[in-house]
Image (cartoon, rainbow, N blue to C red):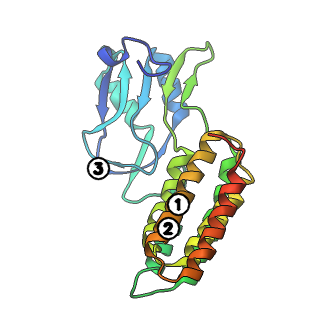
């Protein structure tokens, strides 16, 4: 089975559906922890803050499933706050998403404002420098007796880099200035990387940016400048194996 989960989990667990449609804005993990300890349960969260919930779709899986009662479901629902929009409270990806939206809008043909997009890339780069130095919280939470009570998958560094770079890269394929700035940001983040998988993720993004430019940038001198930034980024990531 899944790491840390008891063998019988898949067989005996029972999903509890979301009480309504809406964005999951925050989760009171301490309340869920107390509930799981008190009722001797293991809870696995299926959604995290920032996700859109659909009424009735699994929000949390409870083991053992035969302990699920209406009272328990009510208590559990009280730990989840839903709303009609995303908020930055517990949703790490939300501020990244907002910057990406501004950049993508700026790069649209009607607006064509690469300066704003570049400013967004700079902000995203410095935020990723801070993020890559942080330890992502473990998905597993134990009670005072070392018993696993809560499995709560959070955001991953790779997922946040995908959010930060994919749409901007797709919108800026033929724009060498934005490609160079993204590669500069990757070289900068490389100086703070502590884990091999994070380096591998940045290497993959640098490769995609360079490939997009090779296919879409018509001017050879511009392409040379992109290649130089790509080389600098890959060299900054060298030795950070993963």
User: 219 or 62, which is in the foreground?
Assistant: 219
Q: What is the distance, in whole Å, between disc 2 and disc 3 at their CAs? A: 25 Å
Q: Position of residue 189 (x, y in %)?
A: 68, 56
Q: What is the distance, in whole Å, between disc 1 and disc 3 at their CAs? A: 26 Å
N-terminal label among 1 and 2? 2
* Residue 164 - label: 1
* Residue 200 visible from this viewpoint: yes
Q: Is residue 172 above or below residue 186?
A: below
Residue pictured at 45% horizontal, 43% vertical: 48
User: 15 or 97, which is in the foreground?
Assistant: 97
* Residue 114 - label: none
* Residue 92 visible from this viewpoint: no
* Residue 100 - label: 2
Instruction: Kindly check if marks 1 and 2 are in contact, taking CB atoms under 8 A apart as contact.
Output: yes
N-terminal label among 1 and 3? 3
Residue pictured at 36% horizontal, 58% vertical: 84
Image quadrant where residue 75 sits: top left
Mark 3 is surrounded, within 10 Å at the Cα level, by few (under 14), some (14 to 19) or many (20 or more) other residues, namely some
Name the residue that disc number 3 marks. Answer: 21
Q: What is the distance, in whole Å, between disc 1 and disc 2 at their CAs? A: 6 Å
Residue pictured at 65% horizontal, 68% vertical: 229
Direction from residue 67 to residue 38 in the image, left or right: right
State which mark lies toward you, 1 or 3: 1
Query: Can you name the residue that lies furthest to the front here?
Result: 220
User: 81 or 143, which is in the foreground?
Assistant: 143
Q: Position of residue 240 (x, y in %)?
A: 70, 44
User: 242 or 37, which is in the foreground?
Assistant: 242
């Amino acid at each position: 089975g899944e790491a840390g989960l008891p063998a019988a989990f898949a067989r005996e667990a029972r999903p509890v559906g979301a009480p309504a449609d809406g964005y999951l804005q925050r989760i009171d993990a301490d309340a869920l922890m107390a509930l799981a300890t008190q009722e001797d349960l293991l809870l696995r969260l299926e959604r995290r803050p920032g996700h859109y919930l659909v009424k009735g779709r699994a929000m949390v899986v409870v083991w053992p499933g035969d302990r699920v009662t209406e009272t328990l479901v009510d208590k559990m629902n009280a730990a989840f706050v839903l709303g009609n929009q995303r908020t930055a409270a517990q949703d790490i990806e939300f501020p990244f998403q907002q910057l990406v939206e501004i950049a993508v809008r700026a790069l649209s043909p009607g607006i064509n404002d690469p300066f704003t997009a570049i400013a967004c890339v700079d902000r995203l780069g410095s935020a990723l420098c801070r993020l890559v130095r942080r330890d992502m919280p473990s998905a597993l939470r134990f009670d005072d007796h070392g018993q696993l009570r809560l499995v709560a998958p959070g955001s991953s560094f790779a997922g946040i880099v995908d959010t930060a770079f994919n749409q901007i890269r797709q919108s800026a394929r033929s724009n060498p200035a934005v490609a160079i700035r993204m590669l500069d940001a990757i070289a900068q983040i490389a100086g703070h990387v502590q884990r091999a998988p994070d380096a591998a993720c940045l290497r993959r993004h640098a490769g995609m940016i360079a490939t997009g430019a090779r296919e879409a940038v018509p001017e050879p001198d511009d392409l040379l400048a992109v290649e130089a930034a790509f080389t600098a980024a890959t060299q900054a990531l060298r030795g950070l194996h993963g």
